[in-house]
Each structure stands twice: as C-alpha cells, then as structure tokens.
Amino acid sequence: MVGRSFLDLGLLSQEQIPIVAARLEAKTEGKAAGSDEYTIKTRNGTCLTLEVKSFPIRIENRTLVLGVARAITDRKLAEKQAEEHREHLFHVSRLSTLGEMASGLAHELNQPLSALLSYANASQRSLGHADRDVERLRANLDQVVSQARRAGEIVKRVRAFAQRRPPVLHPTNINEIVRETLAFLHFEMVHKEIQVVLDLGESLPRVLADAIQLEQALLNLVRNAIEAMETTEPSERRLTIRTAAAAPGMVKVTVSDTGAGLPPEIQGRVFDSFFTTKPDGLGIGLSITRTLIELHRGQLWIEPGKGPGCTFAFTLPAALEDSTVPRGD
Ligand code: ADP
C-alpha cells in the first residue's frame, strides 16, 4: 500500500471512486470537516464498513490527507438490527391497535355496504318498471358509486396502516394527519357520544414526517383519551385536538380530553414500557408514541394543570422547505 493513493488500492467500487476523490480533494483544500463512512469489499468478498477520520497535512510543500480508518461493521450491524427490531415493534403495535378497533371498523364498513345494497336494489327494481325514471336511476347509481368509494377508502386506510414497510419521511400537512386519524375512529366517537373539537391552525408549515408513524402516534393518544372518558358523563365527553405554530420552526399538537385525568404520582411513569393502570392494558402505547415523536426530532410531554382530564402535547420540527427561518444562498 505504501506510496499508493487510497483510490488505487482496489478497495473501492467504480461508483465510489469519484465520490471519495471529490471528498479527498475537499479535505486537501481544508473545505470539508468531519468523518466519513465507506463500505468496502474485502478480498474475500465480505463487506467492511469503515469510519474514516481524515485531516490535511503538509509535507515538503505538498498537501496530503492523513486518514485514520476504523472498522465499525459490527456496530453498524447492531444498529441495523436495533432499527429493524424497533420497526417490527411499531408494526406489531399497529396491528394490535387495529385488532382493538376491529369491531368499530367493521361497523364503519357496514354502513356504506348496506347503503350500496339498498341503492343497487332500488336500481334493479326501477329497471323492471315499464315507465323507467332515468333520472332517479342515475341518482341511485351515483350513490352506488360514491358508497363503493367510501367503503374502498376505509379498506385502503386500514391496509396502509397495517402494512410493514420502512419509514419514509415527506413534508406532511399535520392537519391532514389529524383528520385521517380521526376518520379511523369516527364510528367509535359517535358510538361513545364523544364530541370532537378541532382547532387546527391555518397555513402551518409542513412537518418532515412518516405519515403512518405519525398517525400511529396520534392514534395512541386519541385512543387513550377515549378510554379515559369512559367514566365521564356522556354529555361531558369532549376530545379537543389543536395544531399551532410553535416558535421557532416547530409545530405543536395537543390532544385534550375530559376524562379521569392523571394523578401527579403516576405522571412520571406513564411513558415507561409496560406501565398500565388498565386491566387489559399493554402499557406500551405511550412509550412507543414517545419514541415515534423523538425519531421525528420532536418532543412529547404532559401539559400540566389543564384539567379536567388530561392534555398530551408534542412538537415536531417544520420541514425545511416551509421553514419561516430565512435560508442563506
Ligand atoms: P395502556 O393504554 O395500554 O395502559 P399506555 O402506555 O398508552 O398503555 O398508557 C399508560 C397509562 O397512562 C395508562 O394505563 C393510563 O393510566 C395513563 N394514561 C394515558 N393516557 C391517559 C389519559 N388521556 N388520561 C388518563 N390517563 C392516561
């Protein structure tokens, strides 16, 4: 290796060479800082991940780059496994949430299906009449189409939520996530006579988020709120969701209920895994929600003194494209 350039050692693939070359050049000119990570193929064909720290040095009027490489393959593998494990946990938790909501979802689906059946029957009947009322037939068929769409939307929503796939971050409208989450629980809200109050901020910056994970986080908070209101008088059951801009470059979401509230002595423990006060609770909803929010570089906490009931709040950073902070050239 002595006397040869790092680029000529045969460690890098053809695609890597120009990238590493550009990086080395920037390093030589002192324009780049920090360490780099490269995955290279060794002679026996295995992959090795290297963390390379490098600095420009001057030797006899020439500027060279001094690099120190450390193999971090094991650490990378462990990180990847931890990430996969976490994703698996999120997925299982989503499936269990869907399981809990199954009867509500079945009812929700039943409505458009029954409507479909009656409009289709009515259309069939009118086809049998000698003096067919075409306008009426058209109106009935329009209903058939729109009810079938509605049923399709519900199925689509459930399928998207149940899917296992790596998270994808997109600039996302937080208000749409709120509406989409509530659409999941529409039947349950009506059935449990819960009044839903939405106070959604206008022209909020979008947040960089994985929509399904964010729905999952919100769904956990809203389901907890619904469960907390089981002992509340039906006329007093109120779920309030607020979205607002929070300085600087953050969006804040609060979920408030008029339920039993959280005694101060357990507030510090509710985010722990497996902490539950419910006979059939799993105690992982809030810990998963906190992890999800933190993965989005936000924070989740209990808003103090906003009784009766309980208020959970979280923040998320605004996506850069929408950031109100002026960007440089
Ligand atoms: P689980 O719902 O399975 O118990 P969570 O992690 O979602 O698991 O919640 C942990 C505990 O936090 C609950 O058992 C409950 O005691 C408390 N909690 C969560 N949300 C609320 C709420 N909105 N109002 C009152 N208590 C709550």
Image (cartoon, rainbow, N blue to C red):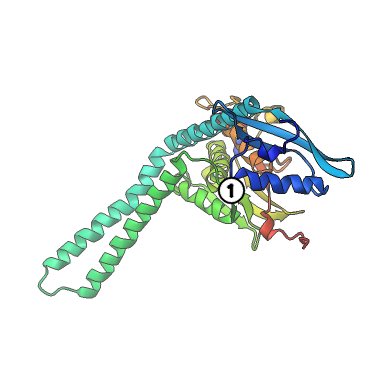
Q: Quarter for ligand 1?
A: top right
The quadrant of the rendering that contains the C terminus is: bottom right
Measured as percent of width and height from the top left, residue 196 is found at 54, 51
Residue for point 25% across, 70% down: 138
Amino acid at dot 1:
Leu
Residue 135 versus residue 329: which sits nearer the camera?
329
Occupied quadrant, residue 198: bottom right
Answer left or right for 186 relative to 284. Answer: left
Q: Residue at x 80, y 40 (%)?
A: 65
Q: Nearer the viewer, residue 93 or 51?
A: 51
Q: Is residue 314 visible?
A: no
Q: Is mark 1 within 8 Å of ligand 1?
A: no
- Residue 303 on image: x %, y %: 71, 41
Q: Secondary structure at mark 1?
A: loop
Percent of width and height locating residue 147:
33, 58
* 39 w.r.t. 247: above or below: above
**Quadrant in the picture for residue 312:** top right
Residue ranking furthest to the front: 3
Asked if 329 appears above or below 242 in the picture, the reply is below
Please give the name of the residue rendered at 46% of the width and 33% of the height, measured from the top-left corner. 96
Outermost residue on the right side: it is 60
Q: Total label count?
A: 1
Crowding at label 1, few (<14), some or many (≥20) Cα neighbours within 10 Å?
some
Relative depth, front residue between 295 and 31: 31
The N terminus: image quadrant: top right
Q: Position of residue 39 (x, y in %)?
A: 62, 35
Which residue is identified by label 1? 169
Say which of 258 and 244 sits in front. 244
Q: Is residue 276 visible?
A: yes
